[in-house]
Image (cartoon, helix red, strand yellow):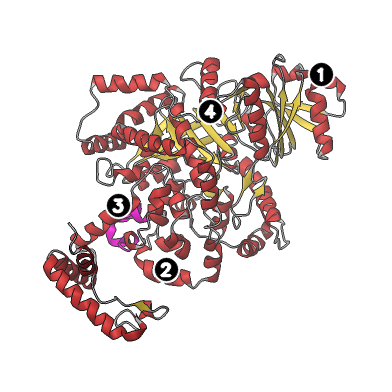
């Protein structure tokens, strides 16, 4: 997928002035976070489960090679096939070949972030195979030729009115000509169109929330049931997964399932959690005759053993973005690549390069909410800080910023000098502010002071006041 | 170098080791075969009767409907009552399951029963569940020649039959039952955990039922356990 993170600042500015985006994302705050808080409070074991989830993911990552090989053995034993792919190009080619072997004309797809990463839909289209997204949100944005703005609610940026117009424009060819405004009617129309697509598709492609080493199963979690129709009706099922999704046992998956839905939507369980193991059995009267698991690295093995390995614990629940004030303000597309919000700010620099994404680790207030709600306790602010340091050290940060930070660092490393300078600064600002105690206009910071006054220091620095207050005490 | 070797090689390189030694590998194998449970919510540590009640309460909260009947033989009438009460089609696609075949459908001549996997025109399906999970009000459906999994998804209305004795406490309990039934390391092709009917909130976060799977999920619980 094309990376546009370089334009974060322009994108943020545009998003803040876009009424539809503001309308759509202002609803996040009262939705997912409220539901998550309720679900967490109703499970006394929730915090302990988060610790256990973190520890279990760490255990898996320490033994990732072993569990992946074990998983592969089990898939083969069950009659499935495993395809290992180092990068996106290899994965696209493998998937295309499987589709060609199945003489596929159309392919239905369940929601999958890894296939977004590799821009699989564009690739299949270019090669004469029609991919059809079946998750309602994914379907909407595919019709609109857009990409997800949220990892579990991909069409979050779309208003109902926009969906009305989109369906009216695109569904005429199926004989649906009425302009629908009721959400239920819109869902019904998409449902009826997609039914025929499920049945006609030659191949069904899904992602995987988990790979179970013990049994060789792939697991998907949905609320709509689209993933299940995608993987049970066509003759061929391809599950595409990144390497870090493997978990040892069914019991281990159970632990993560208790964290996943609660953190994502506040549900105790998503409506459908499905374990697929191998192709259909000889006596079965439905199910796919062939079953392929495509295991994609896509830069993840570089994170193993690194100071940012914690990122590989991610369950892709979306809690970090749901709780992020920056995400709620600028929306998902501003981040400029597949993953928006705090996880994107921490992960995208690894996946597509720090040069392209240098704004993302700075797109944070460091309020820490993301880490507070992460089901597997990924230290997202810490990782963003590591990227900031790396950007400075590798001179990705532009000169004026580096100069400013360098100047501050010069004084910060000399406490005596720092105190003198801040003392002079505080007094000067107090004098400028005069009796009002506020400064209306700041030089070089007009953008900031155009909408608010700058409260001036009261005269003495914190250190001076502290000294004064403690005088005579031991 | 094949991608497989590249990926595994990079992982090992970054972990600063080669393939796991015998001792470490045996420890992981033992862990895989041990099926030990992690933290399990204690909300289901109840007498079985109370677990069944919890299942009913949880499933109902998920917008499934539940009816409790005394014997399996009451299924046809309970099914008819449900369909007529909701003004639904009385054409039923039934799982080709021996237990369902034995039901006295002669008592309900208005029900038109066909057997097999689901087709797009099917409006109502009748399937037996493998287990129920009280913790979350979830049904566990196991696929097989007698229980095609498309019946759980394609029809608009899904009616599932479960005996009270099949209702367990937690997800982990259902794994134990599956292992006992199918053998360790040998799952049926598809295990569906179903928690209420299909839904979506993809249009302005408004909850709409019946996205792609069934709009309605009706659970018939057969109270097969002795009254205590």
The residue to which callout 3 is attached is: A382
Looking at this view, is A333 or A423 the one in front? A423
Q: Is residue A471 above or below residue B190?
A: below
What mark, if any, has residue A12 been given in the picture? 2
The answer to whether residue A326 is left or right of residue A145 is left
Q: In the picture, which quadrant includes the C terminus of chain A?
A: bottom left
The answer to whether residue B53 is left or right of residue A141 is right
Q: Nearer the viewer, mark 1 or mark 2?
A: 2
**Mark 1 touches mark 4? (CB < 8 Å):** no
Residue A442 image offset from top left, x and y in percent: 32, 82
Q: Which residues are magenta?
A: A345-360
- The subunit carrying tag 4 is B
Residue A156 image offset from top left, x and y in percent: 54, 57
Q: Is residue A102 visible?
A: no
Q: Main secondary structure of the magenta part?
A: helix
- The subunit carrying tag 1 is B
Cα gap from disc 3 to disc 2, whole angstroms: 23 Å
Q: Nearer the viewer, mark 3 or mark 2?
A: 3
What mark, if any, has residue B171 been given in the picture? 4
The residue to which callout 1 is attached is: B104
Residue drawn at (40%, 32%) of the image: A247
Q: Quadrant of residue A422?
A: bottom left
Q: Kindly state the secondary structure of the residue where label 1 is placed.
A: loop
């Amino acid at each position: 997928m094309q990376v546009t993170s370089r334009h974060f600042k322009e994108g943020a500015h545009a998003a803040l002035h876009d009424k539809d985006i503001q309308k759509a994302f202002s609803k996040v705050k009262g939705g997912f976070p409220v539901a998550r808080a309720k679900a967490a409070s109703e499970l006394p074991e929730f915090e302990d489960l988060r610790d256990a989830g973190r520890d279990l993911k760490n255990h898996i990552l320490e033994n990732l090679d072993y569990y992946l090989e074990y998983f592969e053995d089990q898939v083969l034993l069950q009659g499935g096939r495993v395809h290992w792919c180092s990068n996106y190009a290899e994965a696209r080619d493998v998937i295309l070949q499987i589709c060609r072997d199945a003489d596929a004309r159309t392919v239905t797809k369940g929601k999958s972030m890894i296939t977004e990463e590799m821009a699989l839909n564009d690739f299949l289209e270019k090669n004469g195979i029609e991919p059809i997204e079946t998750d309602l949100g994914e379907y909407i944005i595919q019709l609109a030729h857009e990409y997800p703005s949220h990892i579990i609610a991909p069409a979050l940026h779309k208003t109902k009115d926009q969906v009305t117009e989109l369906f009216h424009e695109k569904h005429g060819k199926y004989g649906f000509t009425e302009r629908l405004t009721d959400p239920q009617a819109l869902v019904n129309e998409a449902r009826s169109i997609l039914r025929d697509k499920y049945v006609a598709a030659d191949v069904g492609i899904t992602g995987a929330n988990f790979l179970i080493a013990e049994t060789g199963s792939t697991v998907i979690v949905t609320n709509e049931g689209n993933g299940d129709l995608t993987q049970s009706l066509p003759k061929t099922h391809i599950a595409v997964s990144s390497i870090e999704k493997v978990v040892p046992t069914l019991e281990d998956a159970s632990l993560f399932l208790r964290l996943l839905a609660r953190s994502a939507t506040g549900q105790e369980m998503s409506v459908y959690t499905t374990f697929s193991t191998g192709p259909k059995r000889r006596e079965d009267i439905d199910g796919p005759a062939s079953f392929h698991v495509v295991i994609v690295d896509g830069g993840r093995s570089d994170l193993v053993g690194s100071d940012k390995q914690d990122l590989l614990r991610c369950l892709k629940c979306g809690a970090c973005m749901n709780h992020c004030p920056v995400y709620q303000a600028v929306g998902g597309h501003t981040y400029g690549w597949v993953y928006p919000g705090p996880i994107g700010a921490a992960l995208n620099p690894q996946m597509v390069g720090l040069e392209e994404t240098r704004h993302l680790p700075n797109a944070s207030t460091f309020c820490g909410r993301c880490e507070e709600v992460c089901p597997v306790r990924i230290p997202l602010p810490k990782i963003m800080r590591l990227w900031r340091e790396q950007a400075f050290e590798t001179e990705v940060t532009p000169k004026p910023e580096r100069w400013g930070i360098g100047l501050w660092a010069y004084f910060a490393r000399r406490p005596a000098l720092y105190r003198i300078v801040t003392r002079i600064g505080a007094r000067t600002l107090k004098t400028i502010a005069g009796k009002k105690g506020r400064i209306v206009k700041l030089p070089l910071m007009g953008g900031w002071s155009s909408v608010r006054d700058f409260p001036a220091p009261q005269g003495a620095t914190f250190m001076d006041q502290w000294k004064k207050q403690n005088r005579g005490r031991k | 170098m094949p991608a497989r070797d590249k990926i595994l090689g990079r992982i090992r390189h970054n972990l600063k080791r080669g393939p796991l030694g015998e001792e470490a590998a045996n420890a992981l194998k033992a862990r895989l075969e041990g099926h030990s449970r992690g933290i399990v919510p204690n909300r289901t540590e109840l007498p079985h009767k109370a677990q069944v009640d919890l299942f009913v309460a949880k499933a109902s909260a998920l917008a499934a409907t539940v009816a409790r009947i005394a014997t399996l033989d009451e299924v046809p009438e309970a099914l008819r009552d449900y369909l007529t009460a909701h003004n639904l089609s009385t054409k039923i696609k039934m799982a080709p399951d021996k237990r369902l075949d034995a039901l006295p459908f002669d008592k309900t001549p208005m029900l038109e029963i066909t057997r097999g996997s689901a087709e797009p025109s099917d409006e109502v399906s009748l399937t037996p569940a493998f287990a129920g999970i009280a913790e979350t009000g979830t049904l566990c459906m196991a696929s097989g020649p007698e229980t095609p999994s498309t019946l759980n998804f394609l029809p608009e209305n899904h009616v599932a039959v479960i005996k009270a004795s099949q209702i367990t406490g937690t997800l982990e309990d259902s794994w134990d039952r599956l292992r006992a039934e199918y053998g360790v390391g040998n799952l049926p092709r598809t295990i569906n955990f179903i928690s209420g009917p299909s839904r979506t909130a993809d249009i302005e976060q408004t909850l709409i039922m019946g996205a792609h799977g069934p709009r309605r999920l009706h659970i018939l619980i057969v109270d097969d356990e002795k009254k205590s």
